[in-house]
Amino acid sequence: MAHNINYNDKTGKYSFFSVNENAWHGLGQVVEQYPTSGEAIRQAGLDYEVAKSPLFTKSSGILQDADSIEIGSTELEVDGCFANIRKDNNTVLGVVGRDYQIVQNREAFSFFDAIVGGGEGILYETAGALGRGERIFITAKLPDYIRVGKGDDVVEKYIVRP
């Protein structure tokens, strides 16, 4: 699976969208119109939130002191470590420290909208999730271009959030 595009078992879809044409991997949803940021999040299957949860481990189960051995099943909190968990399917996305701050997918898209003043003119072309959803990406075309020299050679401007 060289593409590593997330497959969502709940929806039965790959977490990817593109505008007007399939990507090289042929997965995900193809839409005909450039979506708004909210539509792009839904089309790409990125409409989930992530929560930071304390991390626990099982003890060895054997406690020994001078007079006895006690066998039990206890959990130990791993101090300063947390699991980032997808709230839609309880998938663990990774382990982080106490100071790690989660950026929700909708916040990442809001950042793009803010670059061009409320999302007017920004054209979301692709978005998706990799792995279990721990990495998202967005590509968007900005409304302006760069003209090279005095001719008709123009370069479109894109922003990417890997």
Image (tube, rainbow, N blue to C red):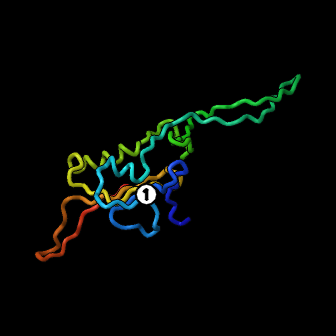
> Given the image, on which type of amino acid does mark 1 rest?
Phe
Residue for point 42% across, 45% down: 47
Residue 44, given in percent of the width and then of the height, sits at 41, 53
Nearer to me, 30 or 154: 30
Rendering quarter of residue 89: top right
- Measuring from the top left, give residue 128's x and y in whole percent: 42, 55
Q: Residue furthest right?
A: 67
Dot 1 crowding, Cα within 10 Å, few <14, some 14–19, many 20+: many
Determine whether, in the image, residue 105 is placed left or right of residue 133. left
Is 91 positioned to the left or the right of 124 in the image? Answer: right
Q: Nearer the viewer, residue 75 or 105?
A: 105
In screen coordinates, is 82 left or right of 126?
right
The spot of residue 6 in percent (x, y) is: 51, 55
Image point (60%, 33%), residue name:
79
For the residue pair 11 and 50, the one nearer the viewer reads as 11
Image coords of residue 57 (percent x, y): 67, 36
Of the 4 image quadrants, the one containing the N terminus is bottom right
The residue at which mark 1 appears reads as: 16
Q: Among all residues in the image, which is located at the extreme bottom? A: 151
Q: Is residue 116 left or right of residue 162?
A: left
Q: How many marks?
A: 1
Residue located 27% across and 48% down the image: 113
Q: Residue furthest left?
A: 150
